[in-house]
Amino acid sequence: MENTLAVINKLEQEGLIGPYAIGGAIAATRFIEPIQTYDLDIFVMLPISPSGLASISPIYSYLTQRGYTPQGECIVIEGWPVQFLPVYNQLAEEALAQAIEVKFGETPTRVLSAEYLAAIMLETGRPKDHARLIQFFESDALDLEVLEDIVGRHGLKGNWKAFRKRFLNEVD
Amino acid sequence: MKSSYPDISGILFAKAQRRQTLAALSWEEKVAIVEQMRKLLPRGMWKDRVADKKSDRPRTRRPTTA
């Protein structure tokens, strides 16, 4: 994983990608027990081309030239299938902007905060997102005030209310 | 006749404690565990198992791309 992150840092240093942060299960694993996953989700701001479009093609081109191979929707970098997720809405953009600077081993990287991960899980709303979110509560990993502020600003109050009612046994 | 069932509260308590212990590991240690899980059950293998069970075919041991 550390070698994978070093390659991603190089992509950023060389301007192939803008700021990035780890999201998904690997980010969640910072806050809760290890969970099964097959890939490393990288939230990323892509540079805009002269034509005004953000494209992931230059990243794939750069990486394949260096021997890394695409696999499904990912590209395998130093043994880890990596999925680059260009920021797709305001919540993801803000989550990336507020990402935490950390080190994995000796390698600097960024990771989404627990509260933004939780908000994204509420937004996505798959059964596995709900299951993970419950684990965040069990691990006492969330600052509820921060989460509720994010939820309120990104139109997720309904999702939040439904989650609390269904999984935290809260009544109206 | 009333059935009597064993008390499994001790098992549940031990499981909860184990989860807490795992959650308290460093991020690097936890990612190392995730890497082990990936190796034990490569991508596609789980899907194969479900499909094999449904069609009653012998299980393939070769991972496939999902």
Image (cartoon, helix red, strand yellow):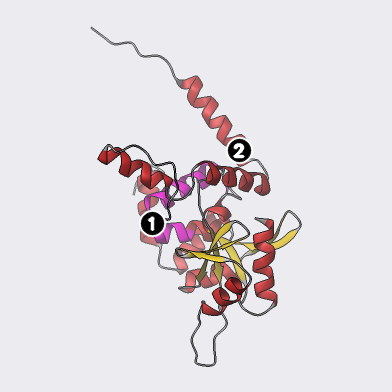
Residue most extreme to the bottom: A50
Provide the secondary structure element on which disc 1 rests.
Answer: loop
Q: In the rendering, at what x and y percent does residue A163 appear?
A: 38, 51
| Numbered badge on residue B22 | 2
Marks 1 and 2, how far apart at CA: 25 Å
The answer to whether residue A146 of the structure is visible from this angle is no
Residue toward you, B52 or A136: B52
Residue most extreme to the right: A106
Q: Which residue is mark 1?
A: A125
Q: Is residue B9 magenta?
A: no
Q: In the rendering, at what x and y percent does residue A62 appear?
A: 60, 76
B66 above or below A150?
A: above
* Residue in the picture at 62% in, 48% down: B31
Looking at numbered disc 1 in the image, what kind of residue is underneath it?
Gly
Residue most extreme to the top: B1
Q: Is residue A13 left or right of residue A117?
A: right
Q: Chain of mark 2?
A: B
* Residue in the picture at 44% in, 19% down: B8
Residue most extreme to the left: B1
Q: Which residues are magenta?
A: A119-141
